[in-house]
Image: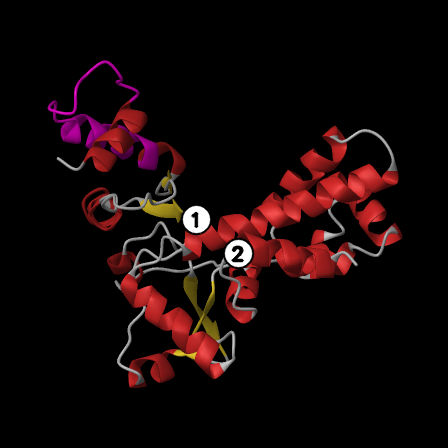
Amino acid sequence: MNVIVWKVMREITNIRFLSVDFDLTGITRRVLFFYRLFFRSNPAVVISVPEHQVGKKYLHITAAVRNLADNFHLRVIVDSSSYSNPPGLMSTIRESVLSVDFMEKNVVESIPELKELIDFLKCNKLDQVVYNVLGGSPSEYINLRDVFEFTTGTTEMKILSIKEHIKFVLIDALYNKIGEASPNTEKIIALFRQIGKLAIPNMELNTNGILLDYPNTVFRQVTTDSRYTIEPATPAVGLIIEHSIIDENDVGKYVDNLFE
């Protein structure tokens, strides 16, 4: 039995002391029957998918979603990133997709919890520099906020800690994302540098005999003007590719120029 389906059935029935070998199908159907009888609607199930680990197989999400939707008539919500999704999940033509992309600069800067950090960045004319590297990712700004708040001392010391964090983000993109890329993804990186653009239509990629491989932490597929486009997965990755940064020394020089 699909482990994900069994865990969902366990949550529905609130029976937690049995092993996966015990079939909860009948009990689950009875619980759902009375749920629909009282509430006149189909319950929704949220499956939170963890980040896909390099070298590991995808979770059996596609089969689980189809099982829960077809056999139990549940509304299934999959909360995941594109990197975590097995390729078949988005090709059933029955799904509705809600994409939460990077925020615009003014939006991420309007988050109340980031006010002190944002005020400091703007006061020291670092807001655009930081946005260029972190992009509109609230979680990245929260990480920077934590660094900012834990740094005591002068303004110069706080700027130095921000600079070091930006350097860390770029080094992570260089070694843990681009450095772990597959041979196929390395061909795409070379093509990006050759063309000199940070967004390539899928068709142009295919013309060069290359397909985007999954999972992929370097590139992502987005829909732009009703066509599929391949672009760097994060702004930091894009900067590494755009400026042909190849090692930690290059990162240091690049960050020094940013903070001049």
Q: Is residue 51 left or right of residue 170?
A: left
Element marked by disc 1: helix
Q: Is residue 133 left or right of residue 87?
A: right
Q: Residue at x 22, y 42 (%)?
A: 72
Q: Residue at x 35, y 79 (%)?
A: 205
Quadrant occupied by the C terminus: bottom right
Count every numbered label the image shows and give the total: 2
Q: Position of residue 96 (x, y in %)?
A: 39, 60
The crowd level at tag 2 (other Cα within 10 Å; few <14, some 14-19, many 20+) is few
Q: Position of residue 46 (x, y in %)?
A: 39, 40
Which mark is on residue 176? 1
Disc nearest the viewer among 1 and 2: 1
Element marked by disc 2: loop
Q: Is residue 74 left or right of residue 100?
A: left
* Viewer-proximal residue among 232 and 254: 254
Query: Residue tagged by mark 2?
Result: 100
Quadrant occupied by the N terminus: top left
Kindly indicate whether the residue at mark 2 contacts the one at mark 1 (C-beta within 8 angstroms): no
- Residue bounds of the magenta highlight: 14-36
Asked whether 15 falls inside the magenta stretch, the response is yes
Q: Residue at x 25, y 36 (%)?
A: 4
Q: Is residue 77 above or below residue 228?
A: above
